[in-house]
Image (tube, coloured by chain):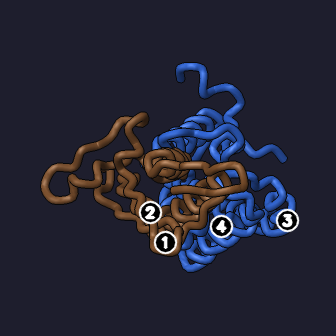
């Protein structure tokens, strides 16, 4: 993802965005882990904190906006819809504040509930 | 008059007055809101969650301690709004778990229950952030650090 100015450009990799998004999501209350984005059918691989970016998919839209998918594991006996809303607002806020890129869409996939 | 024990009826009143108090001071709590998104709605969210919880309590015609705590907990779970509401619902869930099998709460019982609430609230977060809700949450007067 490139941001150009008079002297050159700034290149922010998708991994960097995924790192920021993963970190923001993990700070949200109710989220207890991130899962590997390819592990949706069958095994769920719970990621360690430092690999949380693997639970985040980042795509860039034609108009240069970000589309973020998160694969999360939440705590039991908690209102999942509210936790997901909190994650969305926290991720949007952190990513937009830190990268100054615009976020178009965030999808939270709740892959598991910790019991 | 000194109160030495908390029973279900008193706990119910505590929830009702607590909710009213929070309603009065929600603006102050709103201003504390800096994390994760500084949108200044912590007090409002928490107050709405608590009011929903108390609304459920009003429908309850049972003054048993566990029934009161359990109803408050499920009311907060259903009515949870925002990060602080979710945290509050977890605190109340821990509180209700702690009240299981008790008719009244004495000093030690209250400390245990508050500790159970704090432990439950801490379990549901990966990366507790200083200044986020559980840290401002229950204070059991240092008993947390001593084995009971």
What residue is shown with label 1? A105
Q: Which residue is mark 3?
A: B27
Disc 2 crowd rating (10 Å Cα; few below 14, some 14-19, many 20+) is many
Q: Is residue B23 above or below residue B102?
A: below
Front label number (4 vs 2):
2
Q: Are marks 2 and 1 in contact (CB under 8 Å)?
A: yes
Q: Which residue is mark 2?
A: A68
Above-or-below relation of A99 to B39 = above
Displayed quadrant of residue A6: bottom right
Closest to the observer: A14 or B109? A14
Task: Write down the colour of chain A.
Answer: brown
Q: Colour of chain B?
A: blue
| Image location (x, y in percent) of residue A55 | 36, 50
Q: Are marks 2 and 3 on the same chain?
A: no
Whether residue B17 sits left or right of residue A85 in the image: it is right
Q: Position of residue A17 (x, y in %)?
A: 50, 51
Report which residue position mark 4 lands on: B50
Sequence-wise first label, 2 or 1: 2
Other residues around mark 4 within 10 Å, as few (<14) / some (14–19) / many (≥20): many
Q: Residue, x 84% and y 58% (percent of image)? A: B31
Q: CA distance from mark 4 to mark 2?
A: 33 Å
Q: Is residue B107 left or right of residue B109?
A: right
Q: From mark 1 to mark 3, how far is it between C-alphas?
A: 31 Å
């Amino acid at each position: 993802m490139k941001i150009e100015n008079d002297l050159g450009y700034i290149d922010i990799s998708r991994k960097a965005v995924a790192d920021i998004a993963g970190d923001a999501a993990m700070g949200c209350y109710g989220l207890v882990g991130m899962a590997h984005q390819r592990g949706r059918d069958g095994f769920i691989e719970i990621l360690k904190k430092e690999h949380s970016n693997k639970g985040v998919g980042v795509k860039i839209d034609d108009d240069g906006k970000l589309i973020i998918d998160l694969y999360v594991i939440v705590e039991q006996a908690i209102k999942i819809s509210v936790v997901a809303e909190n994650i969305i607002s926290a991720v949007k806020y952190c990513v937009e504040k830190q990268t100054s890129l615009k976020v178009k869409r965030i999808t939270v996939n709740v892959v598991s509930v910790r019991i | 008059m000194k109160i030495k024990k908390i029973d279900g009826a008193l706990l119910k009143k505590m929830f009702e007055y607590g909710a009213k108090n929070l309603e009065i001071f929600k603006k102050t709590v709103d201003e504390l809101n800096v994390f994760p998104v500084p949108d200044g709605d912590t007090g409002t969210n928490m107050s709405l969650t608590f009011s929903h919880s108390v609304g459920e309590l009003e429908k309850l015609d049972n003054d048993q301690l566990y029934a009161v705590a359990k109803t408050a907990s499920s009311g907060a779970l259903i009515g949870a709004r925002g990060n602080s509401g979710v945290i509050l619902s977890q605190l109340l869930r821990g509180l209700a778990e702690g009240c299981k099998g008790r008719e009244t709460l004495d000093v030690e019982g209250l400390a245990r229950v508050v500790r159970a609430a704090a432990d439950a609230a801490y379990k549901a977060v990966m990366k507790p952030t200083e200044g986020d809700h559980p840290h401002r949450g229950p204070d059991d007067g240092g008993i947390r650090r001593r084995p009971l």
